[in-house]
Image: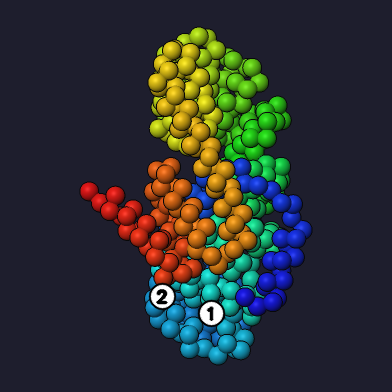
Amino acid sequence: MASLLGGILKTLNQTKKQHSPALPLLILGLAFASLFLPWQRWFGGKLPESNQKSSVLDTARKLFAQNRLDKLIRLAGSINPKAPESAEIYSLAGQAFLARGQVGLAKQALERSLELKLEQPESLKYLAAIFLASGDSARGLALLEFSAKLKPDDFQPWLAIGKVRQETGEFIEAFTAYEECLKRKPPADEARQARIGRIRALIDDHKEEQAQPLISEALQLDPENPDLFGLAAISAQTLGLTEQAEARADQALKQNATEPNALLAMAQLAFLNDNAVAAEALLKKAVVAKPNHPPILQLLMQVQARQGKTIDAAATKKEFQALSGRILQMDKLIKEISQKPDDPKPRYEMGQLAVEGQMKVLAEQCFRAALEIDPAFEPARQALEDLKTETTP
């Protein structure tokens, strides 16, 4: 990568506080899953604007709009790199590679585009998504924040920053990012995500009291959202507002019978009322709805022990300890990925941990990310083949 873009990344990263990801399972699941969703889900689908009247650039835009990706890529490979329009054409080629699932080539094209013209908010967001999808949250966040500075009215980088900060355990920063998103008047769906995000950030930061007015406001705006009612239930339960917790959990479960926060809140209430049998039934549903969630497993272990189910409690304890160990190992690997972005081994090891946790989609993307870096990295290729064999009926 050219020194200009590299310097921006280095400068932005040096200004950040170093935080340890508290929930790397979730952040990697989100980042890797984004490879299979339309990239517009996070960053919108508008093509870059330009005041230049270039027939070559116009042709590239038409090819992209018509989904004639092969021809667009060939066009990008034939242009003069010093031409004024080359940066935007390389950006379109990068998006074309993304649409074809060729993430490594997309990264190269977008980096080349930004080397030629750094002030491209859309290209910065796409490249940020690639870094996030490969587990490199530090560089991904740096690019998102730079994009936000270049385009101050854009809500999209702030929403993405909030999600990443949330999952890396930086709850104050996540709350601030969601607030910045809402200040920019996003569309209804994105506004809903930001409202729920800032509530979740406060709850995760053990600031349930501060979350209460935001919960009330959000419920008025979105009275049929089971996720929101689930958060409201768990928050009320933490504050000792038993009747409110039960009412909100009940409302959540009417809309979604497997809403995990509502199930957890109801299980807590049942356990406090010495109804361990009911609590266990609720927690088993919650485990299915939200696997790999430590609070659910921890309470399930206690509930089973209360009933004298020593074998079941021991099995749950073992599962809880294995999950806690995986989280710590993934935490270390996240740091290693940021330190060694061109090394396939940490991503391969992340995939192995995902296999252990029965997170097959995440595992597949980890192995693919390792192969994007080094197509000859045989352990990742073999692991991917083994994974396909396991899922083949």
Which residue shows up at 67% across the image and 73% down it? Answer: 5
Q: Residue 89 carries which label?
A: 1
- Report the residue that reaches farthest toward the left: 393
Amino acid on which disc 2 is placed: Leu
Q: Which residue is drawn at the image coordinates 40% and 22% (left, top)?
A: 312
Q: Pick the residue in front: 9 or 217.
A: 9
Q: Residue under label 2, please give it.
A: 69
Decide if residue 208 is on the left or right side of residue 381.
right
Task: Tell me which corner region of the image, top left, top right, bottom left or bottom right, holds residue 388.
Answer: bottom left
- Per the image, label 2 sits on a secondary structure element best described as helix
Q: Number of numbered discs present? A: 2
Q: Helix, strand or loop at disc 1? A: helix
From this view, report whether residue 32 is shown above or below residue 301.
Answer: below
Amino acid beneath label 1: Ile
Q: As drawn, which residue projects farthest toward the top?
A: 274
Q: In which quarter of the image is the N terminus?
A: bottom right
Q: Is residue 207 visible?
A: yes
What is the x, y in percent for residue 124?
61, 67
| Residue at image coords 45%, 53% | 351
Residue 225 disc label: none
Q: Distance between the residues labelled 2 and 1?
A: 12 Å
Of the image marks 2 and 1, the number of the one nearer the N terminus: 2
Q: Where is residue 63 in the image (x, y as percent from the top left)?
A: 43, 77
Q: Foreground: 35 or 93?
A: 35
Would you place residue 254 above or below residue 183 in this image? above
Q: Residues within 10 Å of mark 1 (few under 14, many from 20)?
A: many
